[in-house]
Amino acid sequence: MFTDCLYRLTLRDRVALFNTFATSHVNKQAINPFSQDKSVNQLQRRRFSKEEYGRPVKGSKSEIRGFKASLEILKEMLQLCEILDKHSEPLFTPKEKKNDPRKVISFGELFSIYTTISSKLVGILLRARKQSLVDFEGEVLFQRRDDDVPIILLKPIEQIRQILNEKINSTLALLNINEKPEDEFFEKDQ
């Protein structure tokens, strides 16, 4: 489409289009602190607020990629919690503790189940622990060495679905993706 339009442009139009891109690039490089341009040293330093520091420019492709990555991580955390709920056992029997939603599974067993789905189990577990959805001992888990470490699902799956689906939907809203509202990415057990 765009290339067809280029063929229809006159030489003067093509030169003007090139000059527009070149001017835009020069202007971006003039404020880029990593540019090799000597005039950068003479520019006033850009000030960042606490919210802007270390974040991509609003509306940029980098920001959109970040939102999409966050969305995928949230979906994987939800998938992991669904698997934990399905394959784990209650931490306590109803006689020991009534209404305790926590469930437990060994890392070795979870690893054998989850590796057919994704190779990022430990990273997703760390992310889920940061969100207070799961808990386990140690900083990082290793296959074979930590096979007996218990992985504990801390909240009922319905509450986890609600928390993560709210985050997923808010991320989708930030992306301005016009998809159907997704209340649940995984169907509830019937």
Image: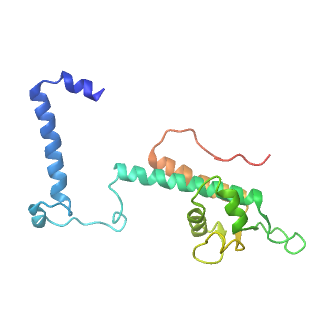
Residue 2: image location, x then y, percent: 27, 29
Q: In this view, does 172 lie to the left or right of 31?
A: right
Residue 30: image location, x then y, percent: 15, 57
Residue 22: quarter of image: top left
Residue that lies at the very extreme toward the right in this rendered image = 95
Nearer to me, 99 or 123: 123
Residue 153 visible in the snapshot: no
Residue that lies at the very extreme toward the front in this rendered image = 144
Nearer to me, 178 or 56: 56
Residue 170: image location, x then y, percent: 52, 52
As drawn, 76 above or below 103 = above
Residue drawn at (48%, 42%) of the image:
177
As drawn, 125 above or below 67 = below
Instruction: Pick the quarter of the image with the N terminus.
Output: top left
Q: In this view, does 85 lie to the left or right of 185?
A: right
Residue that lies at the very extreme toward the bottom in this rendered image = 138
Q: Is residue 132 left or right of residue 188?
A: left
Residue 148: image location, x then y, percent: 72, 73
Residue drawn at (58%, 42%) of the image:
181
Nearer to me, 152 or 94: 152
Residue 73: quarter of image: bottom right
Residue 67 visible in the snapshot: yes
Residue drawn at (18%, 60%) of the image:
35
Q: How many numbered marks have been drawn onto this rendered protein structure?
A: 0
